[in-house]
Amino acid sequence: MDFFAQQARVRGSSRRLVALFVLAVVAIVATIDAVVWLTMGHRPVDGEPVASNLPLLFASSLIVLAGIGFSSLFRIMSLSGGGKSVAESVGAVPVPPDTSDPALRQLRNVIEEVAIAAGVPVPDIYLMADEPGINAFAAGYSASDAAVCVTQGCLDNLSRDELQGVIAHEFSHVLNGDMRLNIRLMGLLFGILVLAIVGRRVIWFGGGRSSRRDGGGGQVWMIGLALIVVGYIGYFFGRLIQAAVARSRESLADASAVQFTRQTDGIAGALKKIAILSEGSQLQAANKQEVAHMLFGEAGSYSALFATHPPLLQRIQALEPGFREQDLVQLAASMQRAAETSPAAPSPTPPTSQLGVPGVRLPPVLPAVLAGAAAVGNSAGSPAFQHAAAVQQAIPATLTAAVQQPESALCVMLALALSLEAELQPAQRRIVADAFGDDVQRAVQAQTVELATLPPIARLPLVALAFPALKQLPDGRQQTLLGALDGLVKVDGRVDLNEYCLARLLRIQLQEARQPRRAPVDGLKKLPACRDSMILVCTVVASAGCSDEASARRAWLLAMQQAFPGEAIEWSPPPSAWQASFERALDDLDGLSPVAKELVIQSLLRAIQADGMVSVEEAELLRVICASLHCPVPAVSA
């Protein structure tokens, strides 16, 4: 998947968004200044020339700029909790990890499967229970604080494949870096709209009341009216900016979902049902316009100017080039027949759908009925999805249940870090007891029995499943956990690769989840600027996957040829204490541009696949490197 190129496009969209927003603000400031000058500043004061009133215009500009800036900052700060804050702002409720509802259980399974395949932690899962339309969104500053929110309409109307297509679409926004831009766009639009709100207040409290006593009410009223007009005009153009930025990214997200799942039936089937069903993708939430640019489908019936997504038929035809609008009529009729034969009450006369096709108002029926009526074939999906599903099924149910609660998830993480060498275990038990007490130490020992049946390749996917629960731990307990993990890793005086990967992955993700707005953004550096760091990382990866130095050197040379073609670079084995320098190198590489990061991953894959096989250690190390570089894990399985 070309997620790196899409991340570069997102950064281009960010620059265009900033430029357009600056132009809009300049136009707003100029208009307000003109109104202020006409009402209060164009007459000479005490015989002085007009220029003496320039400070008034300067003050006016400063006030407007400060108002927009502080309002935007306030809105962005109110969403500092990341995806969780955005989901709760539209009235969504969290989906319990131990839910017994079959539809919610399927939703969790699909999201967990996609997260494992992408190599990212499982996001917070939210449901808009009062929304019958088919829609969803992902929000957050990074993968570590992401939230995926779906409507009840998704659960009622979509098959598993279709739901997977929708979720893959939303995960592409997570992996492409769209989410941070989406939150900023919410803040910028709010900052412009605040002008209109202030204008109403000015008219009511200034021009409408006290200012009438001293004759200045008319001038204040005009300024208030100008603020209202300019605020709504600015909001109008802000919505145009919102729509233009969103449309370009939604097409990319559709394509990414297909690349991700390796099948078009799922996402295309979901789009067809949006086109046919009377509810479509519409939302009932009062602030739906604020999140319209991050949704899977249109939040309402907007004109082409304000549409945040390409037309439905265009999106479907991009996935299925031979599809015609007449096919929707046949599909609608098929679904209507399925609804009429269901045990529910007969459906009323169908309204008109978003494409002019007779809309189907369906009674509550099982998703299986809808799936059969839509004639959407099941697909095994991509190899990455097959691997993720196999890994998910290989995790014992007792462990899956344990990582759903914060304290038991903590015990599982500590148990994962315990050594299999009997002589090291007493010292490790003391570290756990000193950090958390004897009760936790005994619980950790009990979890080691459960972990004995866990396949090695499922270790880090289990961490991904545990992440939502671990985020709920108090900050102090999270820090104690990370400190204890570091102690367990170093207890024998050497760095065990499996233990290191566990500690590094949790440290990165928990720190970013604790301070979402400080999550790193895409850098600007090119690979030659990080030459030494790249050499070291490739050396560690090549050595981890080879049993002898000659094989490691061959794998390393393949990586160097990919990263620095034509350069003569001398091989040297990694240092015995490689952990600290390796982490500094990863932090350095995280500052690379998306295109340069793609070259890093390609080079590492050359080293990993040099011997024709991928070991568990190599797969885990690659997952940690990708998490450190904030990029998706490529499709490679151990």
Image (spheres, helix red, strand yellow):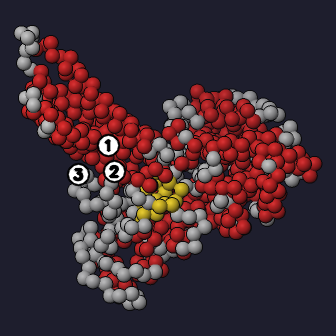
Q: Which residue is drawn at 69% across and 35% down?
A: 583
Q: Is residue 380 visible?
A: no
Give the percent coordinates (x, y) of residue 168.
49, 59
Q: Which picture quadrant has residue 635?
A: bottom right
Q: Name the mark on residue 242.
A: none
Residues tagged 1 and 3 counted as in contact (Cβ below 8 A): no
Q: What residue type is labelled 3?
A: Leu
Name the residue rendered at 55%, 40% in the picture.
515
Which of these two is toward me, 546 or 619? 619
Q: How crowded is mark 2: few (under 14 residues within 10 Å), some or many (20 or more)?
A: many
Q: Is residue 440 toward the left or the right of residue 533 in the image?
A: right
Distance, label 2 to label 1, CA atoms, is: 8 Å
Give the labeled residue for mark 1.
190
Q: Earlier in the sequence, mark 1 or mark 3?
A: 1
- Residue 64 found in image quarter: top left
Residue at the location (77% across, 38% down)?
553
Q: How far apart are marks 2 and 3 (CA)?
A: 16 Å
Name the foreground residue: 7 vs 202: 202
Disc number for residue 305: 3
Query: What is the crowding at mark 3: few (fewer than 14 residues within 10 Å), some, or many (at least 20)?
Result: few
Mark 2, residue position: 290
Query: Which of 562/614 is in front?
Result: 614
Figure quadrant of residue 47: top left
